[in-house]
């Protein structure tokens, strides 16, 4: 094999964020950009000589070209074996499963998740460790370090590998196994859930709409919901992946999955609605006439997980990211199991899952998952919901009403201010941080601050410390506002304001969340001077 050693110099801005490196596609396609980062991953993990890796992506623009480069670089760096999805495709949870199933030395996942795709949109790459989960900070720090000192990368001179059919290929001695992206994942789902019960549910006339948003879950959803479980053809909408996700944002929330929302809120809505994102790890859950927030969904899944064979012996514990509502904590309390609060980002759940401290975990950003893989998993959440509905035979709306009556309702909303000038966003943030110690006791409208702090996390498993993970303002009565700056954006800064208030009065459980949270929203704006700093009186996206 002819190996080229290409001299290069560090490229600024290759610091992995909440979920790997995300940049504009055009930036990833600039000379040496991808190659520098891939070599830095290899160097940051101690080289790949003799190692095996899983490689796959969500099919967005540049996916396959990038994979061809990664294959040639892996060969040049001495990798023994690469397992790659047919046509370069793997959903993020399926990639996590393949890493675990085959015991590889980790994997490379090409995705910018729910961000739009295309030549003028976003691209991303992240390394997952041998447990199948996103690399923790001690590893991403090493990768970043390597990007700042790189002097050369290695790449094999070889033709593109034909990835169109499952089978084996080689670049010199490196074996490339091309696998059906759905097969092993479907087998795993079949182990976890009661497929016969789900078949019976669909056979009894239960109806569903699943919006794959022109993204990676299309083939998985067709195969599971329609082919295996017998849901009628047409249950899966937008089920053919496209490089630019049909020109949309593959983000399963009420704003971007409006087609599904219109169906579920319309006349003759199906019994159940769900959507997943670009790379298949997120989920949105709806019932006829009702949207279920991800925080509520996590709580409900925790309360009823025993309906599914995989969890029938109960849960070891639950975890949620700090900005996620405390609804699941209330369920854990009742079940008598521990509830953990971690920083934002799936990588923080890895240690808890590996150590057997938790079985279920989730984030307010539409991510839910369990011990079955080390990523959040969109279709898994949909199947767990289906398993619960197959057991209870209740509507989604009734399930939620019953849940709120039992546990109270954590009214919740996230307000995003997107593409804010980065300097202004940072000024808002540091001003607010400085103000935190003086806030307790101050009143804003009817609300009085009880405490305010910056969130930091000490990992109970490995003792690692993560500082500066968001600003929390708590109010008397249990309401809270949380401020964070996004770590996944590719332009300017995105300010996230998370709002939550617990309501236990049975007469007040069915309000519009924006109305129920109005005083809190006003207080948050006043305290942080959002308009003063950003010029924005209202958020761009409310979820
Ligand atoms: C966002 C979400 C976070 C999620 C991450 C990766 O990160 O808020 O919960 O883990 O995407 O999917 P953020 O942009 O807020 O840093
Ligand atoms: Zn995603």
Image (cartoon, rainbow, N blue to C red):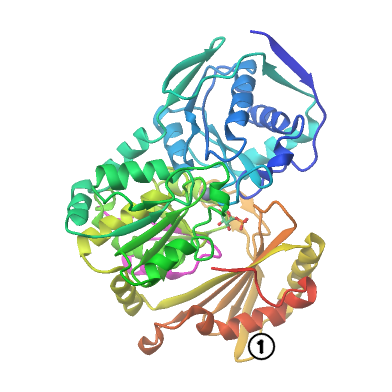
Left or right side of 434 for 350: left
Q: Is residue 315 magenta?
A: yes
On screen, residue 341 above or below 22: below
Q: Is residue 186 above or below residue 305?
A: above
Whether residue 329 appears in this view of the structure is: no
Disc 1 within 8 angstroms of ligand 1 (CB): no
- Residue name at image x 65 percent, y 83 percent: 523
Q: Is residue 303 above or below residue 528?
A: above
| Highlighted range, magenta | 313-338
With respect to residue 339, does 443 lie above or below? below
**Which of these two is toward me, 106 or 116?**
116
The answer to if 509 sits in the magenta stretch is no
The x and y percentages for residue 291 are 41, 69
**Tag 1 residue:** 444
Residue at 32% over, 41% down: 223
Is label 1 in a helix, a strand or a loop? strand
Quarter placement of the C terminus: bottom right
Quadrant in the picture for residue 395: bottom left
Residue 476: percent from left, percent from top? 56, 84
Horizontal arrangement in the rendering, residue 17 relative to residue 504 (left or right): right
Q: Position of residue 8 (x, y in %)?
A: 81, 26
- Residue 470 image point, x, y percent: 65, 64
Q: Residue at x 23, y 68 (%)?
A: 394
Residue 507 visible to the viewer? yes
């Amino acid at each position: 094999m002819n190996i080229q050693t290409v001299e290069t110099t560090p490229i600024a801005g290759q610091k992995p964020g909440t979920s790997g490196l995300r940049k504009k596609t055009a930036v990833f396609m600039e000379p040496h950009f991808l190659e520098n980062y891939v070599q830095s991953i290899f160097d940051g993990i101690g080289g790949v000589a003799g190692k095996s890796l899983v490689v796959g992506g969500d099919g967005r623009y540049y996916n396959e070209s990038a994979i061809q480069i990664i294959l040639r670089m892996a060969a040049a760096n001495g990798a023994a074996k690469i397992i790659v999805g047919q046509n370069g495709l793997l959903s993020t949870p399926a990639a996590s499963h393949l890493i675990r199933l085959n015991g590889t030395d980790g994997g490379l996942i090409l995705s910018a998740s729910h961000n739009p795709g295309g030549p003028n949109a976003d691209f991303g790459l992240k390394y997952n460790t041998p447990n199948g989960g996103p690399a923790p900070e001690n590893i991403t720090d090493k990768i970043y370090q390597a990007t700042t000192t790189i002097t050369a990368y290695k790449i094999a001179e070889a033709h593109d590998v034909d990835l169109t059919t499952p089978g084996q290929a080689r670049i010199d001695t490196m074996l490339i196994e091309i696998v059906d992206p759905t097969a092993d994942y479907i087998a795993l789902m079949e182990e976890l859930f009661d497929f016969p019960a789900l078949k019976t549910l669909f056979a009894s006339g239960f109806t569903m709409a699943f919006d794959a948003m022109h993204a990676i879950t299309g083939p998985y959803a067709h195969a599971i919901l329609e082919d295996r479980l017998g849901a009628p053809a047409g249950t899966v909408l937008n089920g053919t992946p496209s490089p630019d996700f049909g020109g949309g944002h593959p983000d399963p929330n009420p704003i971007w999955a409006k087609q599904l929302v219109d169906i579920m809120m319309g006349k003759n809505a199906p019994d159940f609605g769900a959507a997943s994102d670009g790379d298949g790890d997120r989920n949105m859950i709806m019932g006829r006439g009702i949207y279920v927030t991800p925080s509520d969904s996590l709580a409900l899944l925790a309360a009823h997980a025993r309906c599914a064979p995989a969890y029938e012996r109960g849960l070891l514990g639950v975890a949620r990211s700090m900005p996620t509502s405390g609804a699941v904590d209330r369920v854990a309390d009742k079940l008598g199991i521990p509830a953990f609060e971690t920083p934002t980002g799936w990588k923080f759940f890895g240690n808890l899952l590996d150590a057997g401290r938790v079985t279920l975990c989730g984030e307010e950003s539409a991510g839910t998952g369990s011990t079955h893989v080390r990523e959040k998993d969109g279709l898994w959440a949909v199947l767990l919901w289906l398993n619960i509905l197959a057991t209870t035979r209740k509507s989604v709306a009734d399930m939620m009403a019953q849940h709120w009556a039992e546990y109270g309702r954590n009214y919740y909303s996230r307000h995003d201010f997107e593409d804010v000038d980065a300097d202004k966003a940072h000024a808002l943030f540091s001003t607010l941080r400085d103000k935190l110690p003086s806030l307790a006791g101050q009143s804003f409208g009817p609300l009085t601050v009880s405490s305010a702090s910056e969130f930091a996390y000490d990992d109970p498993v490995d003792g690692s410390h993560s500082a500066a993970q968001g600003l929390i303002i708590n109010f008397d009565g249990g309401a809270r506002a949380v401020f964070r700056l996004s770590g996944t954006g590719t332009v300017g800064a995105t300010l996230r304001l998370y709002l939550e208030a617990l309501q236990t009065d049975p007469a007040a459980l069915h309000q519009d969340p924006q109305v129920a949270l109005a005083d809190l929203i006003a207080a948050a704006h006043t305290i942080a001077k959002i308009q003063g700093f950003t010029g924005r009186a209202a958020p761009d996206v409310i979820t």
